[in-house]
Image: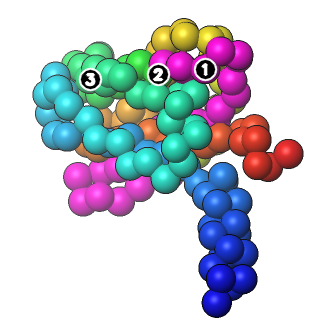
């Protein structure tokens, strides 16, 4: 029985390497503080941990989001991210943040990831973070 559990745990750990962590706002109103992180990759969270989210409106009716990301690592780290935008009915808007962007974050550094909604119809967003060089992947 023990032999079955160990390989399953190892497979589970290896597949978790390619999972993304997700950040969503607590409310849909710009300026409303708070965010929630859905963590499926603890290693990724230590090298790209979201510490703050700010939302406002630009150009009269376009939402803008700025996310602060901190790394507690002692060496530079790489990760990828993308913002996704959704309309009032929860449907993902096409052409909105579909491409992954790569970033490098230095030790103990905080960087800003910023996006503007693709249209005034965008009411909700989420940020996905992906580990691009997890030690178990090498």
Please state if 60 lies on the left or on the right of 45 as rendered. left
Residue 82 in magenta stretch: yes
Distance Cα–Cα, label 1 vs label 3: 27 Å
Q: Residue at x 49, y 12 (%)?
A: 110
Mark 1 lies on residue: 73
CB atoms of marks 1 and 3 within 8 Å: no
User: Please, is residue 4 above or below residue 73 in the view?
Assistant: below
Q: Nearer the viewer, mark 1 or mark 3?
A: 1
| Visible residue check, residue 8 | yes
Q: Looking at the image, tell me whether mark 3 or mark 2 is earlier in sequence order.
A: 3
Question: Element type at marker 2?
Answer: strand
Q: Residues within 10 Å of mark 1 (few under 14, many from 20)?
A: some
Q: Residue at x 35, y 59 (%)?
A: 91
In this view, the residue farthest toward the front is 2
Residue 78 in magenta stretch: yes
In this picture the colour scheme is: rainbow
Quadrant of image for the N terminus: bottom right
- Segment tinted magenta in the rendering: 70-94
Q: Residues within 10 Å of mark 3 (few under 14, many from 20)?
A: many
| x then y, percent, for residue 45 | 50, 36
Circle number at residue 55: 3
Mark 2 lies on residue: 69
Question: Element type at marker 3?
Answer: strand
Distance Cα–Cα, label 3 vs label 2: 15 Å
Please state if 69 lies on the left or on the right of 1 as rendered. left
Q: Residues within 10 Å of mark 2 (few under 14, many from 20)?
A: some
Q: Residue at x 59, y 54 (%)?
A: 19
Q: Residue at x 36, y 23 (%)?
A: 51
| x then y, percent, for residue 93 | 43, 51
């Amino acid at each position: 029985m023990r032999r079955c559990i160990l390989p399953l745990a190892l497979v589970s750990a290896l597949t978790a390497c390619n999972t993304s962590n997700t950040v969503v706002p607590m409310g849909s109103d710009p300026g409303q503080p708070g965010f929630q992180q859905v963590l499926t990759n603890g290693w990724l969270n230590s090298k790209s941990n979201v510490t703050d989210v700010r939302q406002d409106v630009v150009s009269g009716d376009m939402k803008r989001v700025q996310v602060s990301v901190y790394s507690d690592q002692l060496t530079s780290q790489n990760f990828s991210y993308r913002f996704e935008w959704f309309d009032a009915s929860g449907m993902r808007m096409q052409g909105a943040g579909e491409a992954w962007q790569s970033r490098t974050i230095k030790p103990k550094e905080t960087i800003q990831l910023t996006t503007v909604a693709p249209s005034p119809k965008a009411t909700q967003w989420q940020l996905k973070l992906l580990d691009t060089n997890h030690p178990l992947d090498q």
